[in-house]
Every structure is written in C-alpha cells, then in structure tokens.
Image: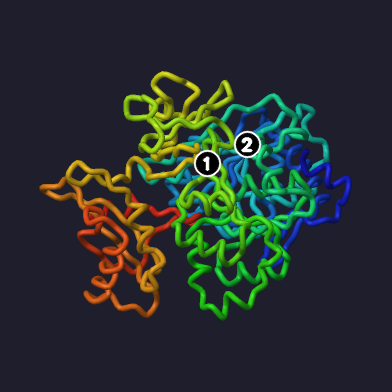
Amino acid sequence: MYPGKWAAIDPDKPAIVLTDPGEQLSYGQLEEQSARLATWLHAQGLRRGDAVALLATNSVEHFVAYWAAVRSGLYLTAINFHLLPAEVSYILSDCKAKVLIASADLADLAKAALAEAPRVEKCLAYKGSIESFEDLHDVIAATENNPPEDDRAGRTMLYSSGTTGRPKGVRLALADISYREDGDAALRNVAPIYGFDEHTRYLSPAPLYHAAPLRYSTQIQVNGGTVYAMPRFDAEEALALIEKHRITHSQWVPTMFVRMLKLDDDVRSKYDVSSMECAIHAAAPCPVDVKRAMIDWWGPVIWEYYAGSESNGSALINSEQWLAKPGSVGKPAVGAVHVCDDAGRELPAGQVGKIYFEQVTTKPFEYYGDPEKTKASRHPEHDNWTAIGDLGYVDEDGFLFLAERQSFVIISGGVNIYPQEVGDAVTMHPAVHDVAVIGVTHPEMGEEVKAVVQLAPGVEPTDATREELMDHLRGQLAKYKLPRSIDFVDELPRTPTGKLRKHQIRATYE
C-alpha cells in the first residue's frame, strides 16, 4: 500500500497537517505532487540507488520529497538542520546526493554547505527563495505526472547523531519490491499491533529529519491516517493538540514525558487526552517513575519499543507487560535477541552484555563508507547477528532490559556503574529540570561519578540544593553508585529528539 490508494478512495482527506500554521496536504495533493517530483527527478538523470537530500524544518513538503524518492527507487537523506555547515557538507558529499531540497528558512545553512559539496547537481527551495535554487512548487507545477516505469521502492538513508567523530550513514539494501506493496518493511509488522488504520490521527511532536518521526509518519500514510506534525515541541501545546484534534496515536521521547509531567497540575488537568489509544515512546531509556506516572495519567495506552536507525531488530512492550516488568523494553518483535560478552559468548539470563539481534535478512545494514564500524557491529561468529552498541540483559521470561551504551559505562575501582540508573533516580526530583550523569577521571579509582544538573526555574544552585539532591539519592542508590560531585549548569545539550550529547558534556571535564 502507498498514499495513492487513499488518494483514489478519498482524495480530499488530509494526509499531513502542520499544526502551526495549520497548513495541510490532502492525499490527492500528496499523490499528484510526489508523482510529478518523481518525474522531474528521473528527468534529471537520477536512477535507482541514487540519493536526494532534504534540509528542512518540519513541513508538508517532507512527505512530497519522501514519496517522490520512494516511488523512484532513490535513497532520501533527511539532514539535521542543527548541524554546522561543514557537517551538512560532509553528509551531502558522503551520501552522494545529486539533488538537494531545502526550506528557505535554512537558506544560509544550505548555501554555506553547498560551497563544499560539489556532487550536488540540482537544488530546489520552498517556503521562499534561495539564490541559485529553483522553486520546488514551480518545478512540480511545470512537470507532467509521468513517474518512472520502474516501480521498485526506494528508502531512507539517515545519519547517526555524530556524537563521536563524523556522522555515519545507515545504508540498507534496496528491496526488489514495488513501492505500492512495501511501505516500510520494518514497520509493516508492528502497524497492526499499534492499530494504525485509516481512522488514525497521529501526533508527531519531533523533528522529521529523525528516523522514527519520519518513518512512523509515512507508515500512517501507508495506512490512510492523518499525521499532525508540530513544528517544534511544546509541552502544553502538545496537550492542547491532543484535545483539539482528538489524537488517537502519538510518539514521544522520555524528555517530552518529563516536560508534560512537570506542568502545573491545573494546566495538565484542563486538557482532555481521553482520545489517545496508543502513545508510543522510544529513542532513550525512560525512567521508571516517569513511565509509571504517564500510565497513571493517560491510562494503559503507553507502548515502548527499542530499535535503532539500523533496523537490525526491535523489541516491544505494552503498559500491562511493563507494569509487571518495570524497566523492560519488552520481547523481540523483529529478530531474536542474544546478549553476549566481549568474546561473543552468549550470556545466561540476568547477566549484562552487548545486545545482538539475529536478523532474518541476508543483507544486514552497513555504515556507509565505514567498513571498520560495520565490521564492529557484527558478532565475531555470526554475520547476521548485529549490534548497535547497547548493553543489557534478558530475564528468565525473555524480557529485555537496557543497561547503557557501552561507551558511557563508568568503571570505578573495576566496578561497572550505569549512568542511566543514577540519572533516573534524580530526574523527577522537583528541583531538577534535566540531568546528565558521566564518568570523570579519578587518579585512584580510574573514574568517578559526576552528576551535571540543570535546575528547575527558581531553584538556586547552592550547596543546600546540592545536599538536598544527595539526600534524595542516598535513599535510592547503593553507596558506590552515588555521585562524588554535582555540578549545576544553565542548560544541558540535547538533540531535538531528546538524546543527551554526553560526549559534549564529558569533553568539558577532560
């Protein structure tokens, strides 16, 4: 299935609504515009396996670009617009993009990046003009609806956050399947579980350059629902949109839950969220207290999944399962899971090791242009067991629990300490707005635990506040896990999708 099916059934139905300023694109418009753009891309000489880049703030045009690329057998690389020009240039060159589509509100970034990206042959702009760029909508209007006869599907090729070194493109092989039938193979299996259908009203509060918001939103369109995309996340506005549009499905990251939970009670209670049938969250571990509070508030509609942009496997858990197994990310939904030690030996239940998914595909993902990183993601004995660097364990009932990214584990006196556990213990303290837990060098112990805290508005960064937080932690953590120091900062660096930039934080203490 693809949006063209729904364009034939109900062409005027909204496929995508940008909640501010309320701009929308119907299924008929999405089908027509994406087909014309696909025709234009083909006329420029792009063929199966070539790349198109998209540098844009959230917009309805994201989906025109996506479906034009998919129906043309192309790779679409959506680029993080918070990157520096040199970083955008690197991605444009690395993915070998022949065409760049950019929103005019990012004109300076686009022009600066292009100066070092000579592979890009054609540039299109929308939401205004960019010097030397053709207008996207003028091109669409002037092009016939005559897309390529080869209907084998394209897909996204997205890049890692680049917290260590340059970002790496996650490249999956193109399948010999028609875009009319395929949709997103990795999500096709879970869509019925979440209940995606033509009645779905899906709220997406995150940037569409990120894998999950883009891929889940397009899966909603595969199933005939309507996507409501926020230009940017705001806690109260999100609740207002749920009530206004009677949102049935949504996807969040844990920091968004925290922001909504920390709204004043009178603000939270004035919005009706009873229409929500399924609220999905992922991207980062969710503190147990935060998730329990969300289930208490919204009811047993909270679903969690664990997966990566690499699409090498996933786990799912619903509210009832989570309440029985607090902290778990569920059982494997795609690919059997194996937890192994550093030598690749599979570990028994309860022991922490590297998480591998056994893939059913004969062509696992690769990190584009980085054979060493690709090799490091493979199990030493099983080529179809792949890992993305997370540690965890499986309990006796087969439920997966995450521990930490391998690179973030603190080793103090030879003992592993998992920063997420420490951070979870302090997250919901009323004095705390945000927290990062890192390891810093210690001459005797190797490393020691440091908490870096962004305080809630109005809380003073005093020794009394520091001691209040330590008293709170002493009641929840073993002594060896306690921070040896707490620093206060004005703001912690997070990506727009909620992930802490821990390498950036740690670098300030080196």
Q: Residue furthest top?
A: 381
Q: Assess whether mark 2 and mark 1 are in contact (beta carbons under 8 angstroms).
A: yes
Tell me the residue at 61%/31% (across/down): 50
Q: Amino acid at mark 2?
A: Ala
Asked whether the viewer can see residue 130, the reply is no
| Precedes in sequence: disc 1 or disc 2 | 2
Q: Is residue 328 left or right of residue 78?
A: left
Q: Residue furthest right?
A: 9
* Residue occupied by mark 1: 307
Point out residue 249 in the picture as x, y percentages from the top left corner.
67, 56
* Residue occupied by mark 2: 186
Tell me the residue at 32%/25% (across/down): 343
Crowding around mark 1 (Cα neighbors within 10 Å: few <14, some 14 to 19, many 20+) is many
Q: Viewer-proximal residue, 175 or 404?
A: 404
Point out residue 336 in the picture as x, y percentages from the top left corner.
53, 30
Up/down of 6 relative to 486, above or below: above
Tell me the residue at 77%/40% (across/down): 2
Tell me the residue at 76%/33% (across/down): 181
Quick one: SS at disc 1? loop
Which mark is on residue 242? none
Q: Viewer-proximal residue, 445 or 162?
A: 445
Point out residue 9 in the picture as x, y percentages from the top left corner.
88, 47
Point out residue 286 in the picture as x, y percentages from the top left corner.
47, 55
- Marks 1 and 2, how far apart in space? 10 Å
Quick one: SS at disc 2? helix
Which quadrant of the structure image shows residue 168?
Answer: top left
Asked whether the viewer can see residue 4, the reply is yes
